[in-house]
Amino acid sequence: MNPTAGDVELNTRIPKRIGRLDELAYNLWWSWHNQARQLFRSLDFRLWRVTGHNPVKLLREVSPDVLRAAAGDPDFLALYDSVMAAFDDDMTTSATWLGSTNPGLVKDVMAYFSMEFAIHSSLPMYAGGLGVLAGDICKEAGELGLPMVAVGFMYPQGYFQQRVAPDGWQNEIYRQLNFSEAPISRVLSAKGDVAIAKVEVGDVTLEIGVWLVRVGRTKLYLLDTNLDENPVPYRQLSARLYVADRELRIQQEVVLGIGGVRALRALGINPALWHANEGHTAFMMLERIREELVKGLSFSDAVEKVRAATIFTTHTPVLAGHDMFPVSSVKRYLNTCCQALGISWKEFFELGQDNPGSDVLNMTALAMKLSGQRCAVSKLHGKVTQRMWHTLWPDLPEEKVPIGSVTNGIHVPTWISPEMYRLYARYLGADWIKKHDDPKLWERVMDIPDEELWRYRRQLDRKLAGTLREHVRKRWVQEGMSPKQMLVGGMFLDPDVLTIAFARRFSEYKRATLIFTDTERLKRIITNRERPVQFIFAGKSHPADFPSKILLQRVYNLAQDDGFQGRIAFVEDYDMHMARDLIAGVDVWLNAPRRLQEASGTSGMKACLNGALHMSVLDGWWYEGYNGKNGWAIGSEQVPSDSQEEDRADAETLYRLLEDEVVPLYYTRDRNGIPRGWIAMVKESIRTAAPRFSARRMLKEYATKCIAPEPARWQTRS
Ligand SMILES: *Cc1c(COP(=O)(O)O)cnc(C)c1O
């Protein structure tokens, strides 16, 4: 590997004794280690909050006096030494899971390509679940010893910040990321150049720069076209995530797919395995075929070789989630690629054809055809995906369509709240986090005294109410807000009231407004004098998704209805930071997708890990996660033939569940005020969901099902 790659520019203001703080700030490892967070927090708590928990910025702005004092403070030094020792151990140990189960694989680098990565809120380069999953995979891969490099896009403006106008309309604010305050560093070529690789996008050849994000042991390389060498319009190519403009989108995907492979080669990285996260990244397979042709392989042998070293994961059954490009733009931007492959346009389009006769290039079809392993993200989604792509294997019966599944999981150290971490440390063992995917460990949740679990849950409720008020206060100070907006922001939320959250990307199939089907009945539930209920909504609409913006507006306007007495909130600008508070601080996490449309969903897993209860349609992960005692299922698994009928029936079930089960269970208390039945369900939920829906279980399953068999096959062919 290139020795100059990404060496962090050292901050000379930091005293030598604590000189590695800078190195720590540039490795997001700190973000999922309590002690490391504590280290930065204790350096300057005020600045820690002001910078939005961004240690790079903190170290730029902290006063030299504070640094000097810290370097002489025995408590700080003890913490510093302990954190750095843990960091070094994690970064270098060979005693990893892969090392002990599959030592032959520890040197086989695996490349992971994704359009978005959610690592930490200081890098706002994600839209939602797909990015969070990619980020969680980067974090967990390093911990398991999977030698992974990840490739994505550097978006200086990232995804937007959400502002909701008083009339409920979502406005988007794009802020320019200040690179010097972000945990990224420039990667230079061996000659010291910023431009690392070239890629042809139509008739222009673009230079690509690369930024490095260190995520524990995983290196995440972000491609950047904003270089002086490039023509002005193309410098903006990488500005934003998920542009609606199809022309821009295909250009971005050419840069990510083809440019990404070339950038890795330029850095001397030659992966044995390539993982494509969603169809956006599929052009990387074409570039690798081209490389094999250059080495002298025939086209069909090159395809076979690439396939044998490629895993593809598809993430959505919703048609709009699959990129399709018209013939004209494909011909415009991939002419060089097609020529280099030595095939006709007809053959080229056949590679990405979803149906016979279809005249678009479907990125998912392309990825399906060029990968040897294809995965869906939950068991049910696996079946749906087999049906959806049956046309690619028309001769096979549907259940034989070669698409498997690995159910998603969450990175537990990232999504556990510090409070619940401490509680588990007491009852599961101080080193519980190291064994968190072991179901036996979680049996001990049953040993936690009800009183204590309840006390921790109450603490989290209070913390959330405080956080939301502070969120509103800041907005009011900085930008002004009407009293109604402040009310909707959650000023009147009461931590003693049963709280239900609906927080996810606004998208029609997720049915954010299902709960409002009968507003009078909902009012009776919410405003019950003895047993009130409150709702918190959060989530962004894609800027170009008009129907979903109208849904969001409807929720926002309903929340202002006096009849709900201030018990419905809409929290602006849902991001990882807000998600961490919400998943831990609410009592029920509600998910209401139309059946078969939620591939997995992961936020409910985060809620369960922290002791909230999940209530969902039996779709995505909940189809396999629900056991009858660990939360609630809205309706049955039967898929109604008509979506209006589905909405009507599910709304009825939802109200009935709230009235007859959820509310009574929450408010039925013993003489000490403890809801015994509720706590029993919480324990069952934690016990069953925490180990199984972890990223650790997911990656071990990937490694066992997909990765371990692959290099062997690859070697027999090469
Ligand atoms: C976890 C997470 C998601 C994914 O949520 P779903 O359950 O898949 O809807 C989206 N956005 C953020 C900020 C998250 O943390």
Image: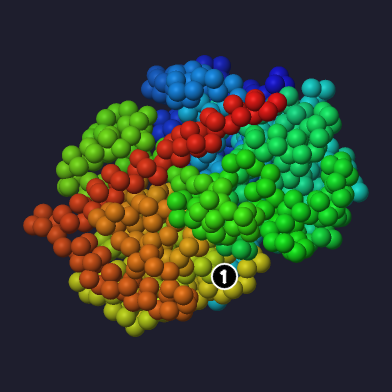
Which residue occupies the extreme left position in the image?
Answer: 671
Q: Residue at x 26, y 57 (%)?
A: 628
Which residue occupies the extreme front position in the image?
Answer: 395
- For the C terminus, which image quadrant? top right
In the rendering, at what x and y percent does residue 655 appear? 31, 74
Q: Residue at x 16, y 63 (%)?
A: 668
Q: Residue at x 54, y 36 (%)?
A: 706
* 56 over 105 or under it: above or below: below
Question: Is 568 or 513 nearer to us in this picture?
Answer: 513
Quarter where residue 296 is shown: top right
Instruction: Kindly tell me whether residue 132 is visible in this rendering.
Output: no
* 652 over 468 or under it: above or below: below
* 691 over 347 or under it: above or below: above
Quarter where residue 55 is shown: top right
Quarter where residue 80 is shown: top left
Query: Badge 1 is on which residue?
Result: 548
Model colouring: rainbow
The crowd level at tag 1 (other Cα within 10 Å; few <14, some 14-19, many 20+) is many
Question: Is 303 or 625 nearer to us in this picture?
Answer: 303
Helix, strand or loop for disc 1: helix
Q: Amino acid at mark 1?
A: Ser
Which residue occupies the extreme right position in the image?
Answer: 203
Q: Is residue 61 left or right of residue 307?
A: left
Instruction: Kindly tell me whether residue 628 is visible in this rendering.
Output: yes
Q: Is residue 484 left or right of residue 175?
A: left
In the rendering, at what x and y percent does residue 679 appear? 21, 52
* 28 over 492 or under it: above or below: above
- For the N terminus, which image quadrant? top right
